[in-house]
Image: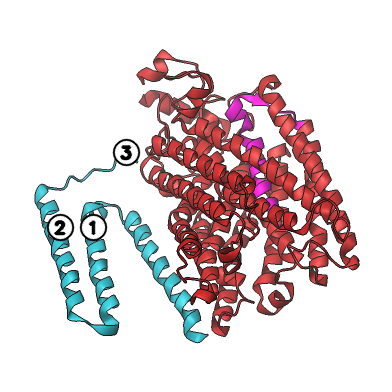
Chain colours: A red, B cyan
Amino acid sequence: MSHSETHPQVSYLEYQGKYKGILGWLTTTDHKRIALLYMYCIVVFFFVAAILGLTMSIEKMRPGQDIMNAQTYNGLFTVHGIIMIFMIVIPGLAAVFGNFALPLLIGARDVAFPKLNLFSWYLYVIGAILAVLSQLLKGGAPDTGWTFYVPYSAGSSTNVIWALTAAFILGFSNILTGLNFIVTIHRMRAPGMTWFKMPLFPWSLYATAWIQVLATPIVGITLLMVIAERVLHIGFFDPALGGDPVLFQHLFWIYSHPAVYIMILPAMGVITEIFPTFSQKPVFGYGAIAISSLAIAFVGYFVWGHHMFTSGISYWSKWFFSFLTFIVAVPSAIKVFNWISTMYGGSIQMRPPLLYAISFVFLFMIGGFTGLFLGALATNVQLHDTTFVVAHFHYIIFGGMGFAFFAAIHYWYPKMYGKMYSDRWAYIAWGFTFVGFNLLYFPQFIIGVQGMPRRYFDYLPQFQWGHMLSGFGAFILLIGLILMAWNLIYHVKRGAIAPANPWKGVTLEWQIASPPTLENFEEIPVIKHNPYWFGTEEEIKREKKSVTRNT
Amino acid sequence: MSTEKHHISTYMSHGVVLTILLALTALSVGMAELHFGAFSVAVALLVASVKGTTVLTYFMHLKYESMFTRIMVGGVFVIYVLVIVLLFFDYLFR
Ligand SMILES: [Cu+2]
């Protein structure tokens, strides 16, 4: 390549195209830079939404009104939900680590449509700006909850339309990223990389991308219908106009349940990359993990009704959705068994990425099992709309996707910045995060079973102990998050230089420089082995000889 | 993978597909005049499906793609049908 010959050593961070500095970043079509653009936005929004969450916890540490009134509280949980769901967890892993690692893992120089990739990021920013505006404009922050349930959302006088439009645009950003990844995976794999020689993070991104492309338009059109209902008074959902509010819940959850898999599948993919590297052992059950990603994506389409067991859907629908919800637990369990088996008999190095990965499995299991309580019809009636549900999905979304995000950033950080963070501070931050997280959410399972409703501003005194513990947990968690962020940000400049392959990984991204050059690979590699092939030293030497002879 | 061959369609085949699509459009307009009652939507959807399939097969090159791509695109329609069935299943038994 003439390109890499003229700039032999320049990394993508130092590479200078047409524009300098910030403009160079804003006009970049490099998948690695776009990944970082997404990451910086997501981290900033994450801290904003986390602080909103913290203020809700503080408010609830004592019954009655303390630091805010009820309307503010309604606005806060809505804003917290919209930011966290639409701006962080849904794009999170795919847009950040998918963008960064997918081309590296499949031996490509970029994604299939680099300009479209940049356009997706701009759509994301526009959506994010609208979401922020919806909080600040006069009319007041939307108070419908992130689910926008009709008929309330059709009538609420707050800035619901702004928030709906924001979610609509963020959805398009998501669809385009998915489309990009599908084409990239179909067309740009390195020669010799058949489907079943592809690493498992790309497999999970592939399953995710299909959900992004297929399911997101449904919520898009549904949100438009709510806007039409508010502006033009067309009766889709509002019974006062002759509509059916349950239809809204159907359409909303037809997207929003698969959306849970948009966030958790890439999380599982990241974890699947980490376990073999830190066990120095091929992943156990490669085929089962690959296929179970597709199975989760497929079955995940048909379980949406479990959000509606108390909404008056038909008896047989309830029965069917409950049954399918239990079925979808099977492929998830297959993955968990395979991760554990990957570690079994390996030479395990408990470095920070593995610590976060193991925490992911632990927290995801708690989230998953409590999901079965909610999937069962009888217990669902008791637990519906209690803090049990809140605890459950925070264990899945934060304990699952969030901890996978932390695992991923600790895993690929040396590749991203060419620097090492401090392992010691990473362990300390993990300790605070893990303890704080469990202290924050576990009590909510218990008070939820006892009858504490979710989204309530005030409560009976017998629930106070749970809210009190949650409040302390929230503070500890935030300390952990700040320590983690500090450790990572500080060492971008001051960290020790990272070698090309600090973890002795065998996938393609570890065979190139840290940080990679603009075009990733000087020469596109030819794939001969399973991606998790840990050859003995002699085997690798022999392999290298034959490669040099061929070229 | 870069080893895959690219199929180049002829103007002839594009022309034939275009003619078929226009004919089907005329057909669906004509059908509206015939008043099938309760079945009019079903008939319109049927014609639209034939048109969609033609576009996917020829204009979007599905005919010349690998089996895997075809299965994935086919799967999309399976999912779509199942979602519709499940949705109306609720309304039917309510
Ligand atoms: Cu669900």
**Spatial separation of the CA atoms under disc 3 and disc 2:** 29 Å
* Above or below for B3 versus B54: above
Circle 1 chain? B
Indicate yes or no whether the magenta region holds residue A420: yes
Visible residue check, residue A115: yes
Q: Are marks 1 and 2 in contact (CB under 8 Å)?
A: yes
Residue A279 seen anywhere in this rendered image of the structure: no
Crowd tier of the residue under label 1, counting other residues whose Cα lies within 10 Å: few below 14, some 14–19, many 20 or above: some
Tell me the subunit letter for badge 2: B
Q: Residue at x 11, y 53 (%)?
A: B15
**Amino acid type assigned to the residue bearing label 2 in the image:** Val
Chain under callout 3: B
* Front label number (3 vs 2): 2
**Quadrant in the picture for the C terminus of chain A:** top left
Question: Mark 2 = which residue?
Answer: B17
Label 1 amino acid? Val
The residue wearing badge 1 is: B55
State the image coordinates of residue A266 (x, y, percent, origin top left).
56, 49
Instruction: Give the residue at x 46% y 41%.
Output: A120
Ligand 1 within 8 Å, label 2 CB: no
Mark 2 nearby-residue class (10 Å; few <14, some 14–19, many ≥20): some
Q: Secondary structure at mark 1?
A: helix
Left or right relative to A480: residue A286: left
- Between the residue at mark 1 and the residue at mark 2, the CA separation in whole angstroms equals 8 Å
Q: Which residues are magenta?
A: A398-423
Q: Which residue is mark 3?
A: B2
| Secondary structure mainly formed by the magenta segment | helix
